[in-house]
Image (tube, coloured by chain):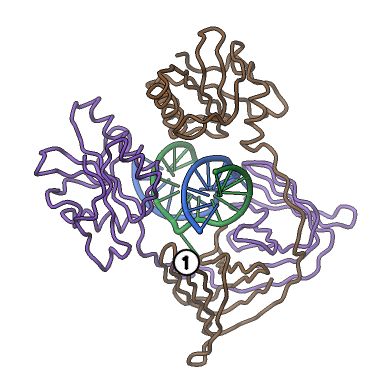
Chain colours: A brown, B purple, C blue, D green
Amino acid sequence: MRIIVADLSANYEGRGKTELPKAIRSIIIKEDGSILIHNEKGFKPVNYMTKIDHYIEEDIDNEKHLLFINRKEKLEIILHSIIEEHNLKLEIDDPAIIREQTEDLLQLYVSQNIEKLDKNYQFISREFETGFGPVDILAYNKNTKNKVAIEIKRNATMNAIYQVLRYIDSMKKYKDQYIEPVVASIKFNDSTLRLAERKKVKCIKIPENWDKEKIINKTTLFDL
Amino acid sequence: MRIIVADLSANYEGRGKTELPKAIRSIIIKEDGSILIHNEKGFKPVNYMTKIDHYIEEDIDNEKHLLFINRKEKLEIILHSIIEEHNLKLEIDDPAIIREQTEDLLQLYVSQNIEKLDKNYQFISREFETGFGPVDILAYNKNTKNKVAIEIKRNATMNAIYQVLRYIDSMKKYKDQYIEPVVASIKFNDSTLRLAERKKVKCIKIPENWDKEKIINKTTLFDL
DNA sequence: ACTTCGGTTATGGCA
DNA sequence: TGCCATAGCCGAAGT
């Protein structure tokens, strides 16, 4: 990892187009060819490029121009003056981060404990293909004798409601099957719940610490 | 901006939960309190935290522990050994990046040149409120005498199609008005076009260099 | 190579 | 402050 602190300006063209005015910032050049220009603010670099094919270094008017290129993008950094430069030796192949409480793990947990959502639910399949994209979980309701499409989210927004309705819609249209729409999530906001109520989508709240606790049945918010 | 290169491990808990095994990486501490742990790969830090409230430094078993805290999150970095450390002086208030060809500018351009989409279109309003969120542009079709809801995207996906259909749907339901659905975009992929055809949504292609060129009428891909 | 989708998405704007 | 939609979203997995 090479770090250059310099008074620089930059131009990017590719996915979008930006002009970065002259200021003192730091450039990070990683071993894999990722280029980041950082200022003193926030998580994101102000300009950047990943997966560069090659780069060209030129001296124009006593200023160093760095040009990073790949098939679709171009990032030019003009170094008006270099203030300092460091070469940092990090481990190239560092051990991967371990993620807990991901949506994938939540999905797996719910599919293996589906009766915690509703005692009448029986698991049918995960990632069931509807023709309009896969539903997270497809289940069977012993009580109503309908199938149930369950969309799992860590944080449910209005989009989740629309998403599950699309599945229902496509199944109705193509196979003339009625399917009960359900969104199960740790977090719901009010506008999402209001929309769900209007659209008759059942929302089931999953406790924050689902990986330790059990899903409580009476947390069900709406009935069909 | 302070940079520490160290043999470190880290634990994050807040929005998610992660464990980062021991390895040599670099820590970037910004003036605004953003903390980034970077390895030699990619755009994203492996661990990070923004908007910290305060931090605690402790020495436990000859190892320095850095604990960054805000109301909802906690990031602990264990420095097994510090390799090097640098203090970089950047400009705190650097001039903002200038973005061109944003969706907002595209929207403005189309609203001022609406007849380029279709010679019969007349502009009514931008960000027209439907009750299910605002439509980008509402227009009038002199030919069919219908109103037209236009969703503008730089890159249209299937979501854009569903989005514009929601507006149509809500207007039909609440005001019993038929509105023609249109998605205008620089890029459409095939699955989006297929969906649009099925759903009778008109797709209009905007040239890549719309900020220099004119929108050509005959690029319209589907009619109602 | 392209598409789809989750993310500790981040970030800006607006209610 | 919280909620919403955009982003040069990124990155990963599947096709």
Residue with the mark numbered 1: A72
Residue B88's spot in the image, x, y percent? 64, 73
Residue B92's spot in the image, x, y percent? 53, 69
Whether residue A141 is situated above or below residue B114 in the rendered picture: above
Question: Which quadrant of the view contains residue A169?
Answer: top left
Residue for point 30% across, 57% down: B106
Question: Which quadrant of the view contains residue B14?
Answer: top right
Taking depth in this image into account, of A148 and A175 the one nearest to the observer is A175
Residue for point 61% across, 36% down: A103
Residue B52 vs residue A20: left or right?
A: right
Tell which residue pokes out farthest to the bottom in this image: A61
Taking depth in this image into account, of B185 and B96 the one nearest to the observer is B185
Residue A77's spot in the image, x, y percent? 51, 77
Tell which residue pokes out farthest to the top in this image: A143
Residue B12's spot in the image, x, y percent? 70, 46
Tell which residue pokes out farthest to the right in this image: B61
Task: Name the chain letter of the residue that bears numbered label 1.
Answer: A
Taking depth in this image into account, of A102 and A39 the one nearest to the observer is A102
Q: Secondary structure at mark 1?
A: loop
Whether residue B71 is situated above or below residue A18 in the rendered picture: above
- Name the amino acid type tagged 1: Lys
For disc 1, the neighbor class at 10 Å (few under 14, some 14 to 19, many from 20) is few
Whether residue A30 is situated above or below residue A131 in the rendered picture: below
Residue B193 vs residue A90: left or right?
A: left
